[in-house]
Structures are given as structure tokens and as C-alpha cells.
Image (cartoon, grey):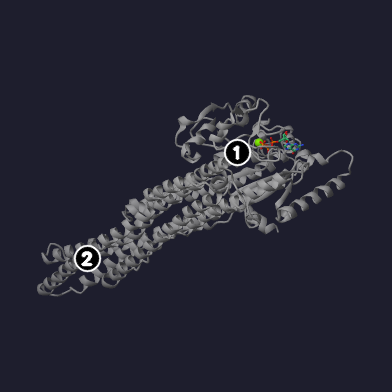
Amino acid sequence: MSTTATAEKIDHLVERVEAYSAWRGTLSAAVAELRAWVRNQDLGDTQADQRLEHVLNLLRDDKLYVAFVAEFSRGKSELINAIFFAHFGTRVLPSSAGRTTMCPTELLHEPGTPAALKLLPIETRKTGTAIAEYRNFPEEWHTVPLDVASAETMAEALSHIAEVKHVPREEAIALGLHVAEDETEIGMRIAEDGLIEIPRWRHAVINLPHPLLEQGLVILDTPGLNALGAEPELTLNLLPNAQAVLYVLAADTGVTKTDIQVWHDHIGSRQEAAGRGRLVVLNKIDGLWDGLRAEDEIDAEIARQARETAETLGVPEANVFPVSAQKALLGKIRNDPALVARSRIEALERALANELIPARRAIVRATLGGDMIGIIKTLRAILAQRLKGVYEHMEELSGLNGRNMEVIDHMMQKVRGDKEVFERSLQRFQATRSVFSQLTNALYGHLALKSLDTVILETRKNMTESMTTVRLKECMEGFFRRTYETMEAAARQAQEIKLMMEGVYRKFQEEYGLANIKPGGLSVARYLREIRRLEAKHEQYMRGRKLVLTEQQVLTRRFFDSAVSKVRAIYKMANRDTDQWLKNILSPMEAQVREHQIQLRRRLESIKHIHQASETLEERLAELETTRDTYRAQERELEYRVDAILQRLEEREPAMLAEAVAN
Ligand SMILES: Nc1nc2c(ncn2[C@@H]2O[C@H](COP(=O)(O)OP(=O)(O)OP(=O)(O)O)[C@@H](O)[C@H]2O)c(=O)[nH]1
Ligand SMILES: [Mg+2]
């Protein structure tokens, strides 16, 4: 990239994303080292190892999502070109008057795979399978190779995103697309040939080597309202998960009725809109540069429009960014800093970086922090227990000094006795394990996908048979209610498991002085929140609506494509989290029990040796001292490594720090 003032500013976003991934990189290097060290020192168990691997996977798969949402022709694609792809020296994503982008388009980089455009045919909507699932089936996608060296051929290849096709009305309905009856209505349009114009593709993925995408940035371009409303996965999945959503308006059209509708459907309530990561872009301000008005008049006009936009949408004025995407692109391509400055794109780019990166760091910090602390606690407990064992044994042996054989004999009896007692309580522990597995079976029973599928089938049957909108609503409500109920039942069951395990832990602690570990709980709050959000979305959609029969069919379809498949995904997630939770709840116990057993055996061994006079007391004590020193060194090293990871995790972003100092 060039070193002009413009390019430096463009690099600002690149640099911040790079700094973020460098942070993530060192973090994962430190975790990987810890893992290797733990293995090497024979410190952890397979559980600790798996948990560390889990942390590493989280770090590796970490992504930053930025989505662009607007009514058609507001300049989303142009804005993406200007912010991210100006260095290609041309317009990469198709952008033109009228509807252009016809399907949601993700721009990302998959390491080790050639640049390509992948397109999922619109017909796949008939299968009721979510886009997310199709990602695992490459053969379902139409693939067009991309030649990144040639901007022209690339732009040509990408023009597929704008493709449409004409189909009979029944076909459009069968695809679950809503057909607009007249100009005022939102939906697929009737083309000149009397057929319905629909998008040719359901979803597009552009795999591209690019400095930002390589660092894990994913950009989501969406089509304007009509095509957008058709794909529930966007509303329910892709947009809510985005760290930043840029909502684009155009200065020449102002805030229209359909703009407002997009805002409500996809950005949602005022509360959500005022929250983090939601930026409003007032595009096409170059339309005001008419060459007649003075510069300060133009600025005043832009300021007025920005203020009004903020008022209309109920967002702080500071969240509204007037820009000219087209002039920004042009200025960057021509290397014209004055034009870039006038386009005001830089303020938006800075805001984007500010929304994106600190938020992402916070998420990584929160998810990882919890995991790491759990792992560290287990490792600390193991070490503490080993040390305790050594000290006790040393004390025991020191007590033997100068004693006669009889005393040693007695001592051996005692250790044998201890071992037997412990083994008996292990049997008791095994017995509790069978209770434990009964309880966990019940827990899995609540969360079983099979039972959910039965509910889904029933709901589908009832919805298909229902004749009225009211009845349809009842079916939907019933579905959500049943999912809440099972989630709540699962939570109760998990609580019971937790209480039982607490009892077991307490007992082992009291009787054998094992570390006092308090198992964490399994929270279903997250799933409930997600399901509630889904229900709210559907309620909002249904509010006050009376549907004719064909619309009811479309709605039923939509409901199954979106809400139901999302609920299923939530259940899957709950099952995975439960697996993890159950492992975590048992593993410290198992690790400690194993340690304790090993120590008892060691004690017995060394007393036996002294008894048989095959080793002197002094030799044995010296050996124990060495072992003690090793454990202490391990303890120090563990703390040192853990500190390094936790400190890294807590680190603030350099750019934010610089900004805080400057202000
Ligand atoms: N004057 C001016 N025109 C712009 C600007 N940004 C975009 N345009 C034009 O507006 C038209 C629509 O831009 P797109 O980028 O295709 O808009 P979009 O929001 O992606 O639209 P869809 O893909 O149809 O949803 C194109 O002709 C652009 O050249 C701008 O800042 N100023
Ligand atoms: Mg577009």
C-alpha cells in the first residue's frame, strides 16, 4: 500500500485489526505453551488438556463481524468498496442504480483455499435447511474462481451477486417468497413478462485474501428490503451476532417509510439501536455539493440532516455519520487526499474500529477468562495436593527417626489402613456416580433433540391444519412455551446435580483434606434469552396481522425456517454446553482422587523400603526434599505462566489507550 496521507488513514483500521489479532495470537501462543508445559510436567489430566484445547480453538475461530443493512440503493455495497476494497483500484462489489445486491453476501477469508465466489441457489429454500447447515456441503454451492490480480475479471465474476430470474407466481410462493400485489406493498415484483422476478441465489460467500479478512474480519453485505425480508437467518442469526451493524441512509432520499421498516425489522428497538456497535450512515452527501452553495452552507445542511436523522431514529447524534461512499472510493483510487477528506469516510472508519475491536476484546476476555480460571484452579489444586502429600510424608518419616522396628511396623499398618479406608470410600464414590449418571440421563432427557423434534412435528401439523391467524399464533406461542418449560426443567435438574456433587466434594474435603472445590452451575439463562428474543421477533411480526390462507402457509414456512431451526440450534448448543459442564464438574474430583491414591501408594512404598532396610531414612528424606523442591518450582512456574496469560487477557487496546490519554 502507498504511504500517502490517505493510505495511512486507511491503514488505521487495518492496523487496529492487526493489533487485535496480534493480541489474540500471543494469547493463544501463551495458552499453547502452558498446555505443552502441563503435559510435559505430567501435571494435568486429559480433562485439563481438553479444556486448554477448547480455549485454543476458541481463539483460532474468533471472528469479527461487520454487517451493512439498508433499503436498496442507499449505497451499502459502495460503502464496502470504499472502506475495504479501494486498494483494488476499482469497484469490486457490484453497485448501481436500482436493486443490485440480490442476496446476502459475506466477504471473508478461508486460509489455505483459493479466492472464489460461492453461490447457494435460491431453490435450496425449499428444503427448509438453514444456510448455516449448507456451509458444510460445498457441493451444493456454485463456485466461481476469482482472479485477485485482475480487478476487472473479479468485478465481472462478482456480478453474479446481482443475478435474478423470472419464475411463475406459484414457484415464488413455493420458495417462501412474498409476492407484492401492488407498488405500495413490499415483496417480489412482477416483471414485464408477467412472471415474478426473484433472486437467483440465496446466499453468496466471497473468499478473498485481504489484510483485514485474513485477520478474521467478516463483512456482510445485504440486499435491500425486499430480498432481505425473505431470509430469516439474516435477521435471526447473522445480524444479532455482528459486532457492528452499519445502517445506511441516503441524503438525497431522506428517511423514507421503507427505511424505517428496515430499521425496525433489523436494528430493532430504540434500546438495541442505542446500544453498542450500531452506527447510522448518512450516505451520498456529495449530492449537496452543488457548486452553488458556499462550503459552510453545505456543512450546515449536512449537520441539519444528521440531526434530523438522529431524532427520527432516536439515536444519539454522535452515532450518525454523514459520508460520501462514492467520493471516498474515487478519492482513494485516485489518491486524492482532499477528496477523501471531503467524503468524511475517515470519521466513520475510526468509529467502526472503535465499535468493533474493544467489543470483541471484551467478549474474548469474558469467555476465555472464565475457562482459564477454571483450568488454573484445577492445576493449582493438583499441585497443592502433591505438595501436601510430600510434607505429610516427610513428617511421618521424621517421626520415625530412632524408633524401633515395632513402631515402623505399626506405622505401616496405619498407612495400609488409611489406604483401605480410602478405597472403601472410593467404592461409595462409585456408587454416587451411578446416581450421578441417573441424574445426568434425566438432564439429557430434557434437552433431547428427539423430544424437541416431536414437538416440532406436532406444531407443524397443527399450524398446517389451522385455519385462522389466531390459531396460528396460538400454535407458535405453544411451541415457545414448551421450549421454555423444558429449559427450565433442565435447569432444575442441573441444580440437583450440582447440589449432589457439592455434597460429595464436601465429604471428600472433610475426610481426606482434599481441596475444597465448589462446582459451578449450569445456566440456561442464555438459551432462554435467545428463545425469548426469537419469540419477540415473531410477535412483533404478527402484531395486528390478519393473514389469508396462502400468507399463512408462507408464515408457517418462515416460522420453521427461522424460529424452529434456531431453537433446534439452541438445543444443540445446550447439549454441548451440558457435556462440557458435566465433564468440568467431575474432573477436579477425579484428578484429586487419583492423586490421593498415588500418594497413599507412595507412602506405603517408602515405609516398606525402610522396613526392609533397603533404604535408609536419610536417603528417603533427601529424596522427598528433592520432590518437594520440584513441586515448588512447578508451582512458581505455573503462577508465572498463568499471570502472563491473565495479564495479556486484561490488556487494553493500544489505540484506545492512546485516545484516552489524548482526551
Ligand atoms: N452520489 C452518490 N451516489 C452514490 C453514493 N454511494 C452510492 N451511490 C450510488 O447509489 C447507487 C446504489 O448504490 P449501491 O452500492 O448499489 O447500493 P446498495 O445499498 O448496495 O443497494 P442494493 O444492493 O440494491 O441493496 C449506485 O449507483 C451508487 O453508485 C454516494 O456516496 N454518492
Ligand atoms: Mg448492494
Depicted 195 relative to depicted 580: above or below: above
Q: Which mark is residue 522?
A: none
Viewer-proximal residue among 39 and 424: 424
Tell me, yes or no, if residue 639 can be seen here.
no
| Residue annotated with mark 1 | 178
In front: mark 1 or mark 2?
Answer: 1
- Kindly state the secondary structure of the residue where label 2 is placed: helix
State the image quarter where residue 229 is shown: top right
Viewer-proximal residue among 621 and 406: 406
Q: Which mark is residue 428?
A: 2
The Cα atoms of the two marked residues, 1 and 2, are separated by: 63 Å
Residue 267 horizontal/vertical position (percent) = 63, 50
Depicted 13 relative to depicted 431: above or below: above
Viewer-proximal residue among 264 and 115: 264
> As shown in the figure, which amino acid type bears the numbered disc 1?
His
Q: Is residue 340 left or right of residue 402?
A: right
Whichever of callouts 1 and 2 sits on the residue coming sooner in the sequence is: 1
Residue 75 horizontal/vertical position (percent) = 70, 38
Residue 10 horizontal/vertical position (percent) = 67, 41
State the image quarter where residue 414 is shown: bottom left
Residue 247 horizontal/vertical position (percent) = 67, 46
> As shown in the figure, which amino acid type bears the numbered disc 2?
Arg
